[in-house]
Each structure stands twice: as C-alpha cells, then as structure tokens.
Amino acid sequence: MLKQRTLSNSIRASGVGLHSGEKVNMTLRPAAKDTGIIFRRLDIEPIQQIPALAKSVIDTMLGTTIAKKNASVMTVEHILAAFAGLGIDNALIDLDGPEVPIMDGSSASFIFLIESAGIEEQNASKKFLRIKKKIRVEDGEKFAEFKPYNGYRISFEIDFDHPMIKSKLTKLSVDFSTLTFLKEISRARTFGFLKEIETLRSKNLALGGSLDNAIVFDDYRILNQDGLRYQDELVRHKILDVVGDLYLMGHILVGEFNGYKSGHELNNKLILKLYTDQTAWEEIEESEITDIPISYWTSSALGRT
C-alpha cells in the first residue's frame, strides 16, 4: 500500500520574495495524516492558515496566489510541485511574509529542503484523483484539458515570438514519477522578458527578480551567462508549474493533462470546471487502481528513515 507522507523533521530557510524583493523566512513542518498542505502566515495576528486548494486561489496573473480571509500567499506553485514530486501529502509551511521565497526560480531548493528534513510514511492510504472523462477550457488559441489515462501524464507546448525560443524545443510530454520529476523537471527555472520585467518593476512588481532566480531574455538573446540548464528548459518549467498548480486538487492525478500556451489562470479554471461535473472525476485510493503506474521513491531509497 502506498501510504501518505509527511516530513520527518522541521527545516528552515530564507530567501527573497519575487515580487516584494524582501527577505522571507520559511519553515517546513510535519503534519498529521489527512491534513493536506497548509500555508501559515505567522506575521498576521491571529496566525492565518490557508489550505493549498484550488478554491483558495484568488489571483493567477504572475503566479498562483491563494488566500483565506485577510491573508494571502503568492507564488505557491514551485514548492507545491516539489511536494507533489516527492509524494508529500501533509505539511505545514510557515511564512513571515506574503510570498514563498523564489529561491533559484525552480523547485530544486525545495526538493533539497524536503530531502534534508526527511520523509516519513504515515498510517493512512495515499489518495488520488482519477479523471473519468475529458474536460477542457479555452482562451482563444490557448487551452488546457484533462483526459482519462492510466497514469499521470503531462503534455505541454509553448509558443513565443522570440528568436531564441523559436530555435529551441517547444513541446514535451512526460509520465510522472519521482525520478522523472527530479531529473527532468525540478531544476527548470522560471523565465521572463526584459521589457516585461521593466514594466512590472514600474508597478512595484518583480522587485526580487534577477538572473539568479530566472531566465531572462532581451529582444535577441538569453542574458544569463550560464545559458539554459536544458535545451528545452522553458517548456519543462511550464510543466513544473502545471505539477504545482494541479497539486491544488489535494491529490496526485490519475489522468492526462494537455496544455497549449496555458498558464496559471487556465490551469485553475480547468480544475474548477472539473469539480462542477461530479461524473468527470473520483477520489480513489491505491487499492482501487489495478496497476498503479505512478512511481514514488520509498523513504529508504531516498536515504531517509
């Protein structure tokens, strides 16, 4: 039986908020079975708890922002992708500000923190969300869709009018597993365009963005001296975003996601549309899957006890 997972120990880190540019202190803590992932704003009295659920999403313009009452947390997708990749079902994320630190713009730092804290199995069966029929949302030529699939597959295509991107691979399809996520997706960084960043900063946004935490393009080239980590790093990062956004369903998917130029907004709209059709999905446990095709490393394989 695949069991639910949490952290073995608490672990602390700090970093810069992508939009505020201010230092953020963060602590990842274990949580009891069936808790889910919960963000806690320690800088607000009384402490506000925000469940990492699709219904908590209030903004998707520059990342995924969740909120409850007067408390919000921005840019949750990269750390949620790390939890999904390592199969963490239950955890508390304590913050003293309104943003998850951007770290290097990927999920790699969060993976390191989780592995350093250790992974502990809990006495409860892991749950999944199975897609039973096709659901699709569109915005002009952009689309995102779910389809039934005996596994967890993400296919994505990007299309940007930029010479350096046109020359790169812009399509990718991956079958989810811990190993696939760690090796092929987790290190892919967020990206942006210099002219857009200048506009955002004039609005007091992206103040923490830099070449240390994002791939930046001017009109003709990549400004990062070290270039790309993967030839198709951009589409890999879009898949990372999808993994994080879809973990707002509270469970790993058994199904297929297809996206064309989709972003956080369409990803969230797809989840909410799915929820409106009770015949399109079901919550299941591993025992209800004949041959589970989703692979998680065990704690011992990760070198943890």
Image (cartoon, rainbow, N blue to C red):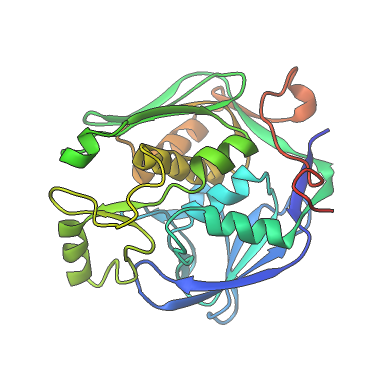
Q: Position of residue 22 (x, y in %)?
A: 40, 78
Residue situated in front as seen by the camera: 37 or 198 = 198
Q: Is residue 15 above or below residue 297?
A: below
Q: How many marks?
A: 0
Q: Residue at x 45, y 78 (%)?
A: 23
Image vertical order of residue 300 relative to residue 296, above or below: below
Q: Nearer the viewer, residue 221 or 295?
A: 221
> Residue 168: x and y, percent?
28, 34
The residue that appears at 60% across and 76% down in the rendered structure is: 47
Instruction: Say which residue appears at 42% left-offset and 35% top-offset.
Output: 270
Q: Could you say where residue 273 lies in the image, as x and y percent from the top left? A: 44, 33
Which quadrant would residue 151 be assigned to in this image? top right
> Is residue 233 among the parts visible in the rendering?
yes
Left or right of 22, for residue 219: left
Q: Is residue 144 visible?
A: no
Q: Is residue 230 left or right of residue 247?
A: left
Asked if residue 180 is positioned above or below residue 38 in the image, the reply reads above
Q: Quadrant of the N terminus?
A: top right
- Horizontal and vertical percent for residue 271? 47, 37
Against 177, residue 88 (above or below) is below
Q: Residue at x 17, y 71 (%)?
A: 202
